[in-house]
């Protein structure tokens, strides 16, 4: 099984984070600390033998992808 590659982990520099999310590192991590209190990843169970759907377990990565999507695909 291959290890999952995270785009969030690849963004190391301030400039790349600001370009991706619109936030500085300081702003991002301040928001992420608040966000992780409310983010509850789940797997959806169909029956006792089968689950469907994968969620992002890391709240920092989830917030990053939400901000990236919002900045990239909305006006």
Image (cartoon, rainbow, N blue to C red):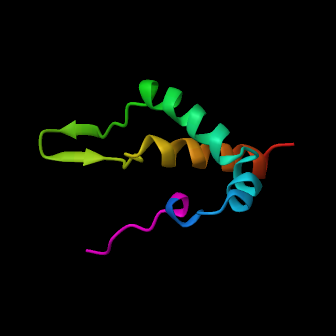
Q: Position of residue 24 (x, y in %)?
A: 71, 46
Please count the marks in the image. Answer: 0
Q: Nearer the viewer, residue 38 or 74?
A: 38
Residue at point 45%, 24% (across, down): 38
Q: Nearer the viewer, residue 68 or 33?
A: 33
Residue 45 falls left or right of residue 19: left
Q: Is residue 43 magenta?
A: no
Residue 47 falls left or right of residue 11: left
Residue 67 falls left or right of residue 33: right
Q: Position of residue 21 (x, y in %)?
A: 71, 48
Q: Nearer the viewer, residue 69 or 33?
A: 33
Residue at point 59%, 49% (across, down): 65
Q: Can you say which quadrant of the picture contains the N terminus?
A: bottom left
Q: Please identify the dominant SS of the magenta region.
A: loop
Residue at point 68%, 55% (across, down): 17
Q: Can you say which quadrant of the picture contains the C terminus?
A: top right
Could you say which quadrant of the image residue 19 lies in?
A: bottom right
Q: Residue furthest right?
A: 75
Q: Which residues are magenta?
A: 1-8
Q: Position of residue 39 (x, y in %)?
A: 44, 30
């Amino acid at each position: 099984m291959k290890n999952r590659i995270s785009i969030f982990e690849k963004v190391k520099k301030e400039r790349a984070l600001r370009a991706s999310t619109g936030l500085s590192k300081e702003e991002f991590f301040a928001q992420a600390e608040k966000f992780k209190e409310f983010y509850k990843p789940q797997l959806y169970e169909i029956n006792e033998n089968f689950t469907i759907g994968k969620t992002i377990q890391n709240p920092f990565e989830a917030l990053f992808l939400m901000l990236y999507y919002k900045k990239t695909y909305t006006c």
